[in-house]
Image: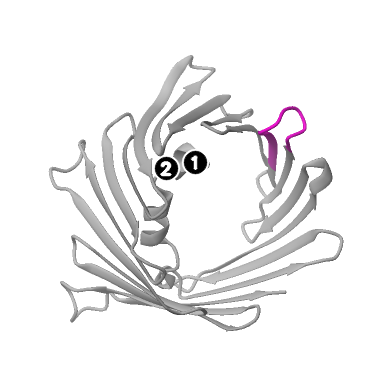
Amino acid sequence: MSIPAFSDIAKSASDLINKDFYHLSAGTLEVKSNTPNNVAFKVTGKSSHEKATSGAIEAKYSDKPNGLTLTQAWNTNSTLETKIEMADNLAKGLKAEGVFNFVPASQSRGAKFNLHFKQPNFHGRAFFDLLKGPTANIDAVVGRDGFLVGASAGYDVQKAAITGYSTAVGFTAPTYNAAVTATDNLSIFSASYYHKVNSQVEAGSKATWNSKTSNTVGLEVAVKYRLDPVSFVKGKINDRGVAAVAYNVLLREGVTFGVGASFDTQKLDQATHKVGTSFTFES
Protein backbone atom coordinates (compact mmCIF):
# COMPACT_ATOMS: atom_id res chain seq x y z
CA MET A 1 0.00 0.00 0.00
CA SER A 2 1.48 3.37 -1.05
CA ILE A 3 2.32 6.02 1.53
CA PRO A 4 0.04 9.09 1.27
CA ALA A 5 1.18 12.69 1.40
CA PHE A 6 0.89 14.44 4.77
CA SER A 7 -2.29 16.26 3.73
CA ASP A 8 -3.86 12.97 2.61
CA ILE A 9 -3.44 10.91 5.78
CA ALA A 10 -7.15 11.39 6.52
CA LYS A 11 -8.17 11.66 2.85
CA SER A 12 -10.73 8.83 2.75
CA ALA A 13 -12.82 10.27 5.58
CA SER A 14 -12.32 13.84 4.35
CA ASP A 15 -13.48 12.99 0.82
CA LEU A 16 -16.53 11.14 2.12
CA ILE A 17 -17.52 14.11 4.30
CA ASN A 18 -16.72 16.92 1.86
CA LYS A 19 -16.83 15.74 -1.77
CA ASP A 20 -19.90 15.32 -3.99
CA PHE A 21 -22.15 17.56 -1.89
CA TYR A 22 -23.48 20.00 -4.48
CA HIS A 23 -25.29 22.54 -2.30
CA LEU A 24 -22.18 24.70 -1.85
CA SER A 25 -22.82 26.29 -5.27
CA ALA A 26 -26.18 27.04 -6.86
CA GLY A 27 -24.94 25.54 -10.11
CA THR A 28 -21.72 24.00 -11.43
CA LEU A 29 -20.84 23.08 -14.99
CA GLU A 30 -17.68 21.20 -15.92
CA VAL A 31 -16.60 20.16 -19.41
CA LYS A 32 -13.60 17.87 -19.99
CA SER A 33 -12.12 16.76 -23.29
CA ASN A 34 -8.96 15.07 -24.54
CA THR A 35 -7.20 15.42 -27.87
CA PRO A 36 -5.21 12.75 -29.72
CA ASN A 37 -1.95 14.62 -29.05
CA ASN A 38 -2.22 14.25 -25.24
CA VAL A 39 -3.77 17.65 -24.46
CA ALA A 40 -6.59 17.64 -21.91
CA PHE A 41 -8.95 20.61 -21.63
CA LYS A 42 -11.18 21.43 -18.68
CA VAL A 43 -13.66 24.31 -18.46
CA THR A 44 -15.45 25.01 -15.18
CA GLY A 45 -18.20 27.49 -14.39
CA LYS A 46 -19.91 28.14 -11.07
CA SER A 47 -22.81 30.24 -9.86
CA SER A 48 -22.92 31.01 -6.15
CA HIS A 49 -26.00 31.37 -4.01
CA GLU A 50 -25.26 35.11 -3.96
CA LYS A 51 -25.67 35.18 -7.78
CA ALA A 52 -21.95 35.66 -8.41
CA THR A 53 -20.42 33.69 -11.26
CA SER A 54 -16.88 32.44 -11.75
CA GLY A 55 -15.10 30.29 -14.26
CA ALA A 56 -11.79 28.78 -15.26
CA ILE A 57 -10.23 27.12 -18.27
CA GLU A 58 -7.29 24.72 -18.11
CA ALA A 59 -5.19 23.02 -20.76
CA LYS A 60 -2.78 20.23 -19.78
CA TYR A 61 -0.19 18.62 -22.03
CA SER A 62 1.43 15.34 -20.94
CA ASP A 63 4.56 13.76 -22.38
CA LYS A 64 4.57 10.51 -20.42
CA PRO A 65 7.75 8.99 -21.91
CA ASN A 66 9.71 12.03 -20.69
CA GLY A 67 7.74 12.52 -17.47
CA LEU A 68 6.80 16.08 -18.48
CA THR A 69 3.46 17.79 -17.84
CA LEU A 70 2.65 21.38 -18.79
CA THR A 71 -0.53 23.03 -17.48
CA GLN A 72 -1.85 26.46 -18.44
CA ALA A 73 -4.86 27.88 -16.59
CA TRP A 74 -6.88 31.10 -16.63
CA ASN A 75 -9.81 32.15 -14.47
CA THR A 76 -12.34 34.97 -14.34
CA ASN A 77 -10.26 36.74 -11.69
CA SER A 78 -7.81 37.32 -14.58
CA THR A 79 -5.17 35.11 -13.01
CA LEU A 80 -2.89 33.32 -15.45
CA GLU A 81 -1.08 30.27 -14.10
CA THR A 82 1.52 28.00 -15.64
CA LYS A 83 2.70 24.77 -14.04
CA ILE A 84 5.61 22.68 -15.28
CA GLU A 85 6.05 19.19 -13.80
CA MET A 86 8.91 16.77 -14.31
CA ALA A 87 8.61 13.29 -12.81
CA ASP A 88 11.32 10.64 -12.40
CA ASN A 89 13.86 12.63 -14.45
CA LEU A 90 16.42 13.37 -11.76
CA ALA A 91 15.70 10.33 -9.57
CA LYS A 92 13.13 7.57 -9.33
CA GLY A 93 10.16 8.77 -7.31
CA LEU A 94 11.13 12.47 -7.49
CA LYS A 95 8.80 15.02 -9.07
CA ALA A 96 9.75 18.69 -9.47
CA GLU A 97 7.21 21.45 -10.12
CA GLY A 98 7.48 25.07 -11.11
CA VAL A 99 4.31 27.14 -10.66
CA PHE A 100 4.12 30.68 -12.01
CA ASN A 101 1.15 33.06 -11.94
CA PHE A 102 0.46 36.58 -13.18
CA VAL A 103 -2.43 38.98 -12.62
CA PRO A 104 -2.36 41.61 -15.42
CA ALA A 105 -4.71 44.03 -13.63
CA SER A 106 -2.44 44.43 -10.59
CA GLN A 107 0.84 43.32 -12.19
CA SER A 108 1.10 40.81 -9.35
CA ARG A 109 3.43 37.86 -9.92
CA GLY A 110 4.06 34.60 -8.16
CA ALA A 111 6.71 31.92 -8.46
CA LYS A 112 6.82 28.64 -6.57
CA PHE A 113 9.04 25.59 -6.69
CA ASN A 114 7.86 22.28 -5.28
CA LEU A 115 9.43 18.87 -4.77
CA HIS A 116 7.67 15.53 -4.19
CA PHE A 117 9.69 12.46 -3.28
CA LYS A 118 7.99 9.10 -2.91
CA GLN A 119 9.47 5.74 -1.92
CA PRO A 120 7.85 2.49 -0.68
CA ASN A 121 7.86 3.60 2.99
CA PHE A 122 8.28 7.37 2.65
CA HIS A 123 6.50 10.35 1.11
CA GLY A 124 8.06 13.79 1.45
CA ARG A 125 7.22 17.19 -0.03
CA ALA A 126 8.77 20.66 -0.05
CA PHE A 127 7.01 23.83 -1.19
CA PHE A 128 8.99 27.04 -1.77
CA ASP A 129 7.38 30.43 -2.40
CA LEU A 130 10.22 32.31 -4.06
CA LEU A 131 8.72 35.82 -4.14
CA LYS A 132 6.85 36.02 -0.85
CA GLY A 133 9.21 35.74 2.06
CA PRO A 134 10.69 33.61 0.60
CA THR A 135 9.00 30.84 2.57
CA ALA A 136 9.31 27.07 2.72
CA ASN A 137 6.82 24.43 3.83
CA ILE A 138 8.08 20.88 4.27
CA ASP A 139 6.22 17.74 5.26
CA ALA A 140 6.99 14.04 5.41
CA VAL A 141 5.23 10.76 6.16
CA VAL A 142 6.80 7.41 6.99
CA GLY A 143 4.83 4.19 7.10
CA ARG A 144 5.09 0.48 7.66
CA ASP A 145 2.49 -2.30 7.86
CA GLY A 146 -0.32 0.25 7.60
CA PHE A 147 0.93 2.55 10.38
CA LEU A 148 1.64 6.16 9.36
CA VAL A 149 3.47 8.98 11.14
CA GLY A 150 3.87 12.43 9.64
CA ALA A 151 4.88 16.00 10.41
CA SER A 152 5.02 19.35 8.65
CA ALA A 153 6.66 22.71 9.30
CA GLY A 154 6.78 26.15 7.71
CA TYR A 155 9.77 28.49 7.67
CA ASP A 156 10.11 32.17 6.73
CA VAL A 157 13.60 32.73 5.35
CA GLN A 158 13.57 36.52 5.72
CA LYS A 159 12.41 36.40 9.34
CA ALA A 160 14.46 33.29 10.09
CA ALA A 161 11.49 31.91 11.99
CA ILE A 162 9.27 28.84 11.99
CA THR A 163 5.79 29.92 10.89
CA GLY A 164 3.86 26.80 11.83
CA TYR A 165 4.00 23.10 12.51
CA SER A 166 1.67 20.10 12.54
CA THR A 167 1.79 16.37 13.11
CA ALA A 168 -0.35 13.32 12.39
CA VAL A 169 -0.59 9.58 12.99
CA GLY A 170 -2.77 7.08 11.21
CA PHE A 171 -3.49 3.49 10.33
CA THR A 172 -4.61 2.28 6.91
CA ALA A 173 -6.12 -1.08 5.97
CA PRO A 174 -7.84 -2.19 2.76
CA THR A 175 -11.36 -1.51 4.08
CA TYR A 176 -10.87 1.07 6.81
CA ASN A 177 -8.50 3.72 8.11
CA ALA A 178 -8.18 6.08 11.04
CA ALA A 179 -6.11 9.21 11.64
CA VAL A 180 -5.41 11.76 14.35
CA THR A 181 -3.98 15.15 13.34
CA ALA A 182 -2.75 18.16 15.29
CA THR A 183 -2.48 21.29 13.12
CA ASP A 184 -2.03 25.05 13.51
CA ASN A 185 0.92 24.73 15.90
CA LEU A 186 -0.72 21.75 17.61
CA SER A 187 -3.80 23.76 18.60
CA ILE A 188 -6.46 22.13 16.39
CA PHE A 189 -6.95 18.41 16.94
CA SER A 190 -8.92 16.13 14.64
CA ALA A 191 -9.74 12.43 14.73
CA SER A 192 -11.28 10.74 11.69
CA TYR A 193 -12.45 7.26 10.80
CA TYR A 194 -13.46 5.74 7.46
CA HIS A 195 -14.95 2.31 6.82
CA LYS A 196 -15.84 0.68 3.52
CA VAL A 197 -18.53 -1.61 4.92
CA ASN A 198 -19.12 -3.43 1.64
CA SER A 199 -19.26 -2.72 -2.10
CA GLN A 200 -22.33 -0.51 -1.59
CA VAL A 201 -21.87 1.24 1.75
CA GLU A 202 -19.16 3.62 3.02
CA ALA A 203 -19.26 5.41 6.37
CA GLY A 204 -17.03 7.96 8.05
CA SER A 205 -16.82 10.47 10.86
CA LYS A 206 -14.60 13.32 12.01
CA ALA A 207 -14.26 15.02 15.39
CA THR A 208 -12.47 18.38 15.71
CA TRP A 209 -11.44 20.42 18.74
CA ASN A 210 -9.87 23.88 18.60
CA SER A 211 -8.06 24.38 21.89
CA LYS A 212 -7.80 28.15 21.33
CA THR A 213 -11.43 29.01 20.65
CA SER A 214 -13.76 26.33 21.98
CA ASN A 215 -14.37 23.91 24.81
CA THR A 216 -16.67 21.77 22.65
CA VAL A 217 -15.86 19.12 20.08
CA GLY A 218 -17.28 19.45 16.57
CA LEU A 219 -18.54 16.21 15.02
CA GLU A 220 -19.47 15.25 11.46
CA VAL A 221 -20.85 11.91 10.31
CA ALA A 222 -21.34 10.88 6.67
CA VAL A 223 -22.51 7.83 4.74
CA LYS A 224 -22.49 6.89 1.05
CA TYR A 225 -24.75 4.26 -0.51
CA ARG A 226 -24.26 3.04 -4.08
CA LEU A 227 -27.69 2.40 -5.56
CA ASP A 228 -26.36 0.67 -8.70
CA PRO A 229 -23.22 0.80 -10.88
CA VAL A 230 -24.06 4.30 -12.18
CA SER A 231 -25.56 6.15 -9.21
CA PHE A 232 -25.13 6.81 -5.50
CA VAL A 233 -26.58 8.89 -2.67
CA LYS A 234 -24.75 10.57 0.20
CA GLY A 235 -25.80 12.12 3.47
CA LYS A 236 -24.10 13.84 6.38
CA ILE A 237 -24.92 15.74 9.55
CA ASN A 238 -22.88 17.68 12.08
CA ASP A 239 -23.21 18.46 15.76
CA ARG A 240 -24.88 21.81 15.00
CA GLY A 241 -27.77 20.05 13.29
CA VAL A 242 -26.84 21.01 9.73
CA ALA A 243 -27.58 18.11 7.38
CA ALA A 244 -26.81 17.61 3.70
CA VAL A 245 -27.89 15.08 1.11
CA ALA A 246 -26.71 14.46 -2.46
CA TYR A 247 -27.51 12.29 -5.47
CA ASN A 248 -25.10 11.51 -8.31
CA VAL A 249 -25.91 9.61 -11.50
CA LEU A 250 -24.15 8.81 -14.76
CA LEU A 251 -26.89 9.74 -17.25
CA ARG A 252 -24.98 8.27 -20.16
CA GLU A 253 -21.37 7.75 -21.15
CA GLY A 254 -19.56 11.01 -20.40
CA VAL A 255 -22.48 12.85 -18.77
CA THR A 256 -22.81 13.01 -14.97
CA PHE A 257 -25.52 14.86 -13.04
CA GLY A 258 -25.47 15.73 -9.36
CA VAL A 259 -27.99 17.46 -7.11
CA GLY A 260 -27.75 18.25 -3.42
CA ALA A 261 -29.29 20.20 -0.59
CA SER A 262 -28.44 21.27 2.94
CA PHE A 263 -30.84 21.90 5.82
CA ASP A 264 -30.44 23.48 9.22
CA THR A 265 -32.57 21.14 11.30
CA GLN A 266 -32.61 23.71 14.13
CA LYS A 267 -34.08 26.40 11.85
CA LEU A 268 -36.42 24.58 9.50
CA ASP A 269 -38.78 27.58 9.44
CA GLN A 270 -36.04 29.95 8.23
CA ALA A 271 -34.52 30.46 4.79
CA THR A 272 -31.15 28.96 5.64
CA HIS A 273 -31.38 25.98 3.33
CA LYS A 274 -29.38 25.62 0.11
CA VAL A 275 -29.86 23.61 -3.08
CA GLY A 276 -27.32 23.09 -5.85
CA THR A 277 -26.84 21.14 -9.06
CA SER A 278 -23.84 19.97 -11.08
CA PHE A 279 -23.33 18.77 -14.66
CA THR A 280 -20.08 17.18 -15.86
CA PHE A 281 -19.42 16.41 -19.52
CA GLU A 282 -16.42 14.29 -20.57
CA SER A 283 -15.26 13.28 -24.00
Identify the magenta region.
87-100
Q: Quadrant of residue 35?
A: bottom right
The quadrant of the picture occupied by the C terminus is bottom right
- Residue behind mark 2: 9
Q: Is disc 2 in contact with disc 1, using a CB cutoff of under 8 Å? A: yes
Q: Amino acid at mark 1?
A: Pro
Q: Residue furthest right?
A: 37
Residue depicted at x 26% and y 58%: 220
Where is 173 relative to 139, above or below?
A: below
- Residue 4: horizontal and vertical position, in percent? 49, 41
Residue 70 magenta-highlighted? no
Q: Residues within 10 Å of mark 1 (few under 14, many from 20)?
A: many
Q: Quadrant of residue 30?
A: bottom right
Q: Secondary structure at mark 1?
A: loop
- Residue 132 in sight from this viewpoint: yes
Q: How many marks?
A: 2
Residue 96 magenta-highlighted? yes
Residue depicted at x 75% and y 28%: 90
